[in-house]
């Protein structure tokens, strides 16, 4: 169900470092150590999250932001932060396209001054929904179909009233429970908005009472377990099951109202609160107090009240106790739960992270938004379980995360899907088709960007063909009307920036000097291994073919001007194992296999021995590498990655050197400066299976670097042996490699 006000679900100090690379620069201000972000709702399929900044940096206002995998956190409607731009977001429709909250008139561009409820869509922007006679109102919940909004508003006498808004009727008060009511708030509404639930506060004990509302009955008090306070926070899509809490023995106990009849969830000894109910009404989630530590719980008629961790274990997942702190929202069949993890101290805050848990669902996995007025019993029973996390009605209510449809997806062609170990849970039949388990958004995002690194190794392997084994092309000349053959090998490291890998290459080539031009051809194999987070590995193995033409453009006694044109093509495959933290700290693995392809072309002008022993050159090259789409298998949260291609266009200027030290031995070397014209690579797109689509913005490239090489060359008759060490400054290239070559003329 859609969340109404999920307090303290999400903290930027927990998410900031992991999300920054996937966010537009303008959104980064929402994720820094000075500004926390508190989640307020999630769409049915988990692909859209709404949240509000909770600044500690002197800015006195909260600000509504929207998160998707594609954009990270961005301000709702593009509204910039500011003292006159106060705007929060509290409700989200089932499909994630309609939002509600409250905003100042300066944001709504209406008069008079005040903070009023709005309805926002991409097509219509902010729509001012008015108030009940004053200038202040707050939208706190929205129907799954996006057409009904509930919340609170001050009337003309300054009294806070529960309200409901529709396009046809405008904003209307839901009335009052009795003449002693001091205020009332509606927190949630059913799928089509026909039922609203909330809390009424009175001047006599009990001060706070749970209520439900329909157009035919008006506001009616819900049953309680005793004479104490009660709270209603969420309602199923059909309007028949309500989640909340009621006082029993001096503490709040999680309860469930079905067709108006109250029942506990079985656990009454400890404080607990039910914060959300599944769309089909058969699952409730919430928080339960210690004995050991607070945790999130899940209830259904068969299993009773169990911790989220215990539910995941019953779904076949290995998970550590103490992984969850709350359970704040669930989807249609209770197969996806979101909440916050146990808090840890990250100065200057005690912070939690947002988690997504996926396991076995209960009942129908698709939900109608239509309210059921039959009064029959079609959902689960009552007492069977436990409870949690003391009550008190701060209005935190339910919300709908994950599950449902798989947005985005993309090209999953290109290679068969190999398995992948998983020591942190797995399974099937959960949350829209992915594996089962628990993961935080921090850990989820941190692992998805590895595909960009994999693609970078593909492009770099083409570059190494041209500028590693293909470096110093004039060394591969044969005397006129004679032939040359060579064997080259390169072995190096690729660990600039976030990369951590190794590169190897072997090549066999032949050429013939026809007089005016020499034609060379070569076949080779290249391998790349990239190490990723938590022991993940990407192994890429490719074969390539290379064709090269060398001709003298302007002769001199010392050598003259030479032109070189080189082309290469590559094909191969990659085995990818993506490891990530899941299930409270265990390592899960998802794996896939895909195909690689690439090509490169280079043109070089080089003046041999322009200065004695030194041959300066200028060069331009272009390479493009592609990794076909693939779908992972195994693990709690496998993903599907779309086809990814990246290009590199480079300009080089430098010189080769050969300084004889004896009749047979020379010292050889190269020094060059390189500029890459692309400022960044391609975005990584795909979907986390069962959760929704993602698009990770590519990190900016380091466009300039320097390469230096030095080695030795020895000639014995028609055979020449060489070995050269290469290093580069930080950039988009292999960081260091050793090149060895044997060539002979005949």
Image (cartoon, grey):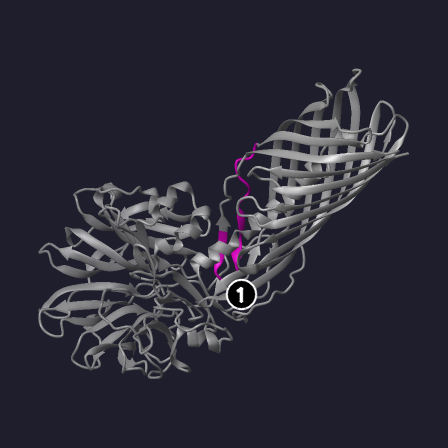
**x and y, in percent, of residue 523 in the image:** 79, 43
Residue 13 can be seen in this image: yes
Please report the residue visible at 67 percent of the width from the left and 59 percent of the height from the top: 416
The quadrant of the image that shows the C terminus is top right
Vertically, is 306 above or below 588? below
**x and y, in percent, of residue 41 in the image:** 35, 59
Vertically, is 45 above or below 559? below
**x and y, in percent, of residue 719 in the image:** 85, 36
Residue 644 can be seen in this image: no
The quadrant of the image that shows the N terminus is bottom left
Q: Secondary structure at mark 1?
A: strand
Q: Which residues are magenta?
A: 677-694
Q: In the rendered image, which residue does mark 1 sit on?
A: 588
Residue in front for this viewpoint, 420 or 688: 420
- Is 712 within the magenta? no
So how many labels did they put on this image? 1
């Amino acid at each position: 169900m859609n969340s109404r006000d999920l307090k303290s679900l999400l903290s930027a100090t927990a998410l900031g470092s992991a999300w920054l690379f996937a966010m537009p620069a303008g959104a980064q201000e929402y994720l820094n150590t000075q500004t926390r972000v508190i989640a307020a709702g999630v769409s049915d399929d988990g692909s859209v999250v709404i949240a509000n900044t909770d600044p500690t940096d002197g800015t006195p206002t909260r600000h509504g932001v929207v998160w998707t995998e594609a954009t990270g956190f961005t301000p709702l409607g593009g509204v910039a932060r500011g003292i006159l731009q106060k705007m929060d977001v509290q409700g989200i429709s089932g499909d994630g396209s309609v939002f509600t909250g409250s905003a100042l008139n300066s944001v709504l561009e209406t008069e008079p001054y005040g903070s009023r409820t709005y309805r926002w869509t991409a097509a219509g922007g902010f729509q001012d929904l008015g108030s009940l006679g004053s200038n202040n109102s707050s939208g706190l919940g929205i129907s799954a179909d996006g057409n009904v909004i509930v919340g609170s508003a001050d009337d003309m006498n300054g009294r806070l009233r529960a309200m409901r808004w529709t396009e046809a009727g405008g904003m209307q008060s839901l009335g009052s429970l009795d003449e002693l009511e001091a205020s009332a708030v509606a927190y949630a509404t059913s799928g089509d908005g026909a039922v609203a639930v909330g809390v009424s506060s009175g001047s006599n004990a009990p001060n706070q009472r749970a209520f439900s509302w329909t157009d035919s009955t008006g506001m009616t008090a819900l049953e309680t377990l005793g004479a104490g306070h009660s709270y209603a926070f969420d309602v199923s899509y059909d309007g028949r099951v309500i989640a909340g809490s009621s006082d029993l023995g001096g503490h709040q106990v999680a309860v469930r109202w079905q067709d108006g009849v109250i029942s506990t969830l079985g656990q009454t000894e400890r404080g607990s609160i039910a914060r959300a109910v599944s769309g089909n009404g058969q699952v409730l989630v919430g928080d339960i107090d210690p004995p050991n530590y607070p945790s999130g719980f899940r209830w259904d008629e068969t299993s009773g009240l169990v911790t989220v961790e215990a539910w995941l274990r019953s779904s076949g997942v290995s998970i550590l106790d103490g992984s969850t702190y709350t359970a704040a929202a669930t989807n249609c069949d209770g197969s996806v739960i979101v909440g916050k993890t146990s808090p840890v101290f990250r100065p200057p805050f005690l912070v939690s992270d947002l988690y997504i848990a996926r396991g076995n669902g209960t009942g129908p996995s698709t939900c109608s938004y239509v309210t059921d007025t039959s009064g029959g019993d079609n959902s689960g029973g009552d007492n069977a379980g436990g409870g949690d996390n003391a009550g008190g009605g701060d209005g935190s209510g339910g919300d709908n995360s994950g599950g449902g449809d798989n947005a985005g997806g993309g090209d999953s062609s290109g290679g068969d899907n190999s398995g992948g170990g998983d020591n942190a849970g797995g399974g099937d039949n959960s949350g829209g088709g992915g594996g089962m388990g628990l993961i935080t958004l921090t850990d989820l995002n941190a692992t998805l960007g590895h595909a960009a690194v994999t693609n970078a190794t593909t492009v770099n392997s083409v570059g190494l063909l041209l500028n590693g084994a293909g470096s110093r092309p004039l060394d591969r000349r044969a005397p006129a009307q004679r032939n040359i053959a060579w064997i080259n090998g390169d072995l190096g490291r690729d660990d600039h920036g976030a990369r951590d890998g190794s590169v190897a290459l072997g090549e066999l080539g032949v050429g013939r000097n026809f007089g005016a031009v020499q034609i060379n051809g070569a076949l080779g194999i290249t391998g790349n291994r990239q190490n990723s987070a938590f022991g993940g590995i990407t192994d890429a193995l490719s074969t390539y073919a290379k064709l090269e033409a060398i001709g003298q453009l302007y002769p001199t006694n010392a050598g003259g001007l030479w032109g070189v044109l080189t082309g290469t093509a590559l094909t191969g495959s990659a085995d990818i194992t993506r490891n990530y933290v899941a299930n409270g700290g265990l390592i899960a693995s998802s794996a896939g296999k895909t195909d690689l392809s690439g090509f490169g072309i280079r043109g070089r002008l080089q003046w041999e021995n322009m200065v004695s022993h030194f041959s300066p050159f200028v060069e331009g090259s272009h390479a493009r590498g592609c990794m076909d789409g693939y779908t992972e298998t195994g693990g709690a949260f496998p993903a599907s990655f779309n086809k990814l291609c990246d290009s590199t266009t480079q300009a080089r200027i430098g010189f080769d050197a050969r300084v004889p030290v004896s009749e047979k031995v020379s010292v050889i070397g190269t020094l060059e400066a390189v500029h890459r014209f692309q400022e960044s690579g391609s975005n990584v797109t795909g979907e986390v299976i069962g959760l929704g689509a993602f698009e990770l913005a590519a990190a900016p490239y380091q466009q300039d670097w320097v390469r230096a090489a030095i080695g030795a060359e020895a000639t014995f008759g028609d055979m020449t042996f060489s070995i050269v060490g290469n290093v580069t400054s930080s950039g988009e290239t292999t960081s260091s490699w050793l090149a060895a070559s044997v060539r002979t003329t005949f």
